[in-house]
Amino acid sequence: MQVLFKSRDREAVRLRSFARQRIRFVFRRMDWLISKATVSMSDINGPRGGLDKRCQVQVQTPDATPVVVTSIARDWRGALDLALARAARSIIRRQQARIATRGPRDFDAVYRGSGL
């Protein structure tokens, strides 16, 4: 899994290695589903403070439809954790829906068609 980090804020850039470790930890069991994860961090209000740290996580999956999640929190780590949790839930939901729509396999038809 390729991990990209984007930010113009000095404080957020300091979290680059932490963000990469956190992404790899959160998606460790879904690594086979994810080809690329991009994290973008920005400070909406600048130095004024408040609920203004924005984290956007974009995860590329094999079905070519990326999962994009945005979260806003008071601090960088909170925004990152919230966005990663939401992205993981979304990927799990998509995978479960894909398996459910595939339907059950008819093993009798498989054996009848193979001549066994």
Image (tube, rainbow, N blue to C red):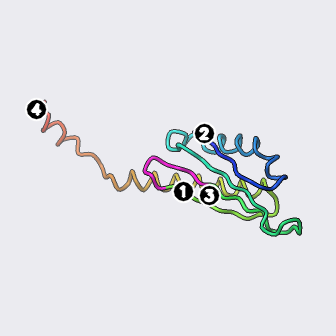
The residue indicated by pointer 2 is 28
Give the amino acid type for the residue marked by disc 1 in the picture. Val
| 18, above or below 82, in the image | above
The residue indicated by pointer 4 is 115
User: Which quadrant is the N terminus positioned in?
Assistant: top right
* Residue 85: x %, y % from top left: 64, 54
* Earlier-in-chain disc, 4 versus 1: 1
* Residue 101: x %, y % from top left: 35, 56
The residue indicated by pointer 3 is 86
Q: Of tags 4 and 3, which is closer to the observer?
A: 3
Q: Of tags 1 and 2, which is closer to the observer?
A: 1
Residue at left 66%, top 41%? 25
* Earlier-in-chain disc, 1 versus 2: 2
Task: In the displayed orientation, state which residue is furthest to the front.
Answer: 8
Q: Secondary structure at mark 4?
A: loop
Q: CA distance from mark 4 to mark 3?
A: 48 Å
